Amino acid sequence: TSDEGWNRATEEWLANWSLACDVRGLLDWNTIQQVATRTMLRDNELFVLLTDNGDGWPMLQLVESHRCETPAYLNGERRVIDGVRVNAQGRPLSYYINLGDTDKFSEVQSPDVIVLAERDRADELRSLSRLVTCLNLIQDREEILTNTMVSVKRSSTIGLALEGEGSAGFFGPETTTTDGITTDRILGAGAIWNVPNGRKIREIKDDRPSPNLSEFMDQFLRAVAAGLGLPYEYLWKADLSGPSQRFVLAQAQRRFDEISQAIITQLVSRVRLWALAKAIKRGDLTGRDSAADREDLKLGLTSYASIYAARGEDWQDAIDQKIAEQAYIRAKCDKAGIPVSEVQFIPNQPQPAPVTPPSAQPADEPVAVTPQPELAAGTVSVSMSAPVETSLTETFSMKDDPDLELSDKELDMVAKAVGLKNKRPAKKKRG
């Protein structure tokens, strides 16, 4: 807001709240955002319940998407779909959360639930994981890697084979010939003393995993990258040239911006507003701005102690600090020869008009007097300024002498002076 004191008090309260906002007491606010982001990327859905600890302190509870389901006793209910109760227009009214047992559920009202998800369809109530398009491929890839690993381990266990008629396989330490050649002697570090006639030793080689398998497995990873909306080269292979790398990074950054915007809009902004509203209701924050405080202070409805106490400050320390600052500013301005108004703006404070001291006239020098030009005969002087009264001059008006008459020439002069030009006033007839 425009109130810096309110902003500071708000941020301090949020910093303290972020350390104790999880119902289970395991996560802080920053960790909750990280967990929520990972869960949304994997499941594309996470429920955040808005609750409190009993005395109004706001608390958050994370619920994974598989716990929201329709109870068995509501099967067949038309207005309950995948654990969501809706109205006639399809607006979610409440969510059914499984409490851990198969038959125990909690119905949470919609205003108390944040459903964090990236929507793919306009009328969907529940969201599917973005990996749903490649789940089968991920399982196939895992099975191929597992079987290949088993084959490589088995082939590496047996390195030599004794070939010939009547020869037995030697999977184990048992004696394989009548001459006492055993598996451990063949595979051990010592030399083989004797090979029976008609038999030979063959080295067992296995080329698995083949180079083609690596390229084949890349197709599965490309499907995963496509499902997450990220470039394959960013996730797995980055052996690209400079322009190609910049293109891949820009494409990945656009995807990260989409994810960040979803987290900020759906989770962070709403949680901050909700938590601050709870704090104001509890009395932890005043919810007032400085303008209202100033008006109340002017009218005598509040005091400095109340205002500074709401900000978590001592009013006496604040006043002392303000006096010290003002004294410092004035001292510096006086030393620099500049007015305080050029350094500090104080609204609604009248500034004194500058006073210029009169210049002293030396006593021994005569006062210079500029002579006024004499009026020529027949000239009328007209001025718009107010007349200056003086006790030395006798005032005279034409109204003082009702029998006063002006000649034609004088009337013309007066008419021209007042803007009547050639219009001549009619003469007053004497009775």
Image (cartoon, helix red, strand yellow):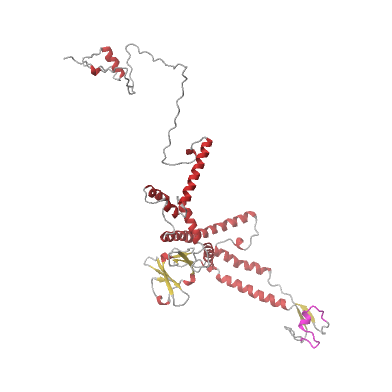
Q: Quadrant of residue 198?
A: bottom right
Residue 256, percent from left and from top: 55, 59
x and y percentages locating residue 421 in the rendered image:
29, 18
| Magenta part, dominant SS | loop
Q: Is residue 389 magenta?
A: no
In-image side of 357 versus 150 (left or right): left
Q: In the image, what residue occupies the spot 46% across and 74% down?
A: 99
Front residue of 116 and 356: 356
Residue at figure coordinates x 61%, y 71% from the top left: 141
Tell me where residue 50 appears, x and y as whole percent.
Answer: 45, 65
Q: Residue furthest bottom?
A: 178
The single residue placed furthest to the front in the displayed view is 363
**Residue 269: where, in percent of width, then height?**
47, 58
The stretch of residues the image draws in magenta is 175-192
- Side of 128 relative to 399 (left or right): right
Verify whether residue 181 appears in magenta.
yes
